[in-house]
Image (tube, rainbow, N blue to C red):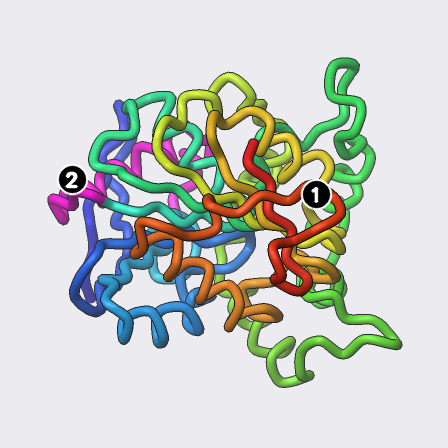
Amino acid sequence: MPFVKSVQNNMDPVNIYYEDCGKGKPVVFIHGWPLSGAMWEYQVTQLTQQGMRCITYDRRGFGKSDWPFDGYDYNTLAGDLKSLLDKLDLTDVALVGFSMGGGEIAKYFSLYGGARVSKVVLVSAVVPFMLKTADNPNGVPQEEFDKMAKGMMEDRPAFMKNFNKDFFGVSLSNHAVSDAFLANSLTKTMEASPVATLQCAQSFSATDFRKDIVKINVPTLIIHGDSDKTVPIKVAGEESAKLINGASFIVYEGEPHGLFYTAKERLNKDLHDFILNSSGPADHKFNGKENSGKSNENYVNA
């Protein structure tokens, strides 16, 4: 299996598992919490057929990567991303970060100036700042994150089973994904280190990326579902669109957090158009009343 060895400061080296498929424009996909690089299955299988070299990797503590007992802060995680880009000697890279993965991108630009990167896509991302504070009143209260930690400590499988339902927008009236898909997702989440799962939740909930995200200086596309209960659009997608200079923002109406699956065909098209074409979502504007003839799509040039 292919691994990149990431060496961070005085920490022990960590083996980061990755997969490299297809030929063409290099695209590095950064997975969300508490999944692994395998979550990108429905993107990789299609986009490799459309001129993209799709590279996925497992964050330390998740999937097939090593499970260290520390190093789950975003500075270290961004360093792992840098190790991957350097090892594969990638240039003109598009970074696609889902949920927690958006934080790695923000820190990578802040710490390393966005070296090797030409485009960014933030999908349901946790940036710029999740936690409710005096200067971030729309954030999520600390009590909610405390409940998450308590649930994981008491019964991680039960917590993750319920968490997945909100993640994919499943309710009594909405069966957005099959029972088999939910069961498979639960299996993937349980393959992660419990230490990594807890510490990464602390990192994405408490890290303030507002000074990092403004360092993103390449064409950027933000995609967020307006029914996202996991990472609310008002505190995340909308704020990111305000802070990243020239970013384009697409609202997926009615979609939950896990839109990489629930809206996979639409997401794949938007990724293709933005990453490979010189013209894409950034050319469209949304004024709150019209959407350039594209049903259910809201485009905002921030």
Hey, what amino acid is under mark 1?
Answer: Ile
Q: Quadrant of the N terminus?
A: bottom left
Q: Which residues are magenta?
A: 68-92
Q: Is residue 273 above or below residue 116?
A: below
Instruction: Tell me which residue sits at (43%, 65%) in the image.
Output: 40
Hey, what amino acid is under mark 2?
Answer: Asp
Instruction: Tell me which residue sits at (48%, 50%) in the image.
Output: 281
Where disc 1 sits, the SS reads loop
Q: Which mark is residue 70?
A: none
Where disc 2 sits, the SS reads helix
Q: Position of residue 238 (x, y in %)?
A: 66, 36
Q: Position of residue 219 (x, y in %)?
A: 38, 37
The tag earlier along the polypeptide, 2 or 1, is 2
Q: CA distance from mark 2 to mark 1?
A: 33 Å
Which residue in the structure is indicated by mark 1?
A: 233
Q: Quadrant of the C terminus?
A: top right
Tell me if I can see residue 163 in this picture.
Answer: no
Residue 49 within the magenta-colored segment of the rendering: no
Nearer to the camera, 26 or 275? 275
Tell me if I can see residue 280 in this picture.
Answer: yes
Which of label 2 and label 1 is nearer to you? Answer: 1
Q: Viewed as shown, does residue 103 lie left or right of 219?
A: right
Residue 88 within the magenta-colored segment of the rendering: yes
Which residue in the structure is indicated by mark 2?
A: 86
Specify the quadrant of the image occupied by residue 159.
bottom right
Specify the quadrant of the image occupied by residue 109.
top left
Nearer to the camera, 147 or 46? 46
Nearer to the camera, 77 or 266? 266
